[in-house]
Image (cartoon, grey):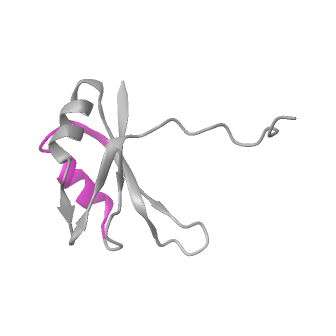
Amino acid sequence: MARTIFIGNLPWAATEDDLIGLVSPHAQVVAARIAADRETGRSRGFGFVEVEDDDLERAVDALQNTVMGGRLLTINEAKPRPPRGGSMGG
């Protein structure tokens, strides 16, 4: 099973291949994607890399304080996305 690393503060020109290259020395990469704006298709400045369960903590630790394109990246385990829709209580 795979777990997901969140990578934030990405340079606008970063690609999914860049994410794979960043993480692959530290973990077995399953998939990578950069979040894009739905209207423009441009990067939103963050992405996700799925890695094998056993590799997640090692990769997150190894990637702390990583700089890409002059920007200090934010690296942590991705939090599960809250369900869409539904009511806000009441």
Compared with 84, 72 (above or below) is below
- Quarter of the figure with the C terminus: top right
Residue lying at the far front in this picture: please name it: 90
The residue positioned farthest toward the left in the image shown: 25
Asked whether residue 6 is drawn in magenta, I would say no
Residue 70 position within the rendered picture, expressed as x and y whole percent measured from the top left: 20, 72
The magenta stretch spans residue 21: yes
Corner quadrant of residue 89: top right
Q: Quadrant of residue 67?
A: bottom left
Q: Quadrant of the N terminus?
A: top left
The residue at 54%/67% (across/down) is: 37
Q: Quadrant of residue 73?
A: bottom left
Nearer-the-camera pick, 83 or 17: 83
User: Left of 77 or right of it: where is 17?
Assistant: left
Count of picture labels: 0
| Front one among 88 and 52 | 88
Residue depicted at x 32% and y 73% = 13
User: Percent position (x, y) of residue 82?
Assistant: 62, 38
Q: Where 14 sits versus 19, above or below?
A: below
Image coords of residue 5 (percent x, y) = 34, 42
Q: Which residues are magenta?
A: 14-30
For this orientation, the residue located farthest to the right is 90
Q: Residue at x 70, y 42 (%)?
A: 84
Give percent across and percent down for residue 58: 18, 33
Give the residue displayed 35% in from the left and 62% down from the top: 9
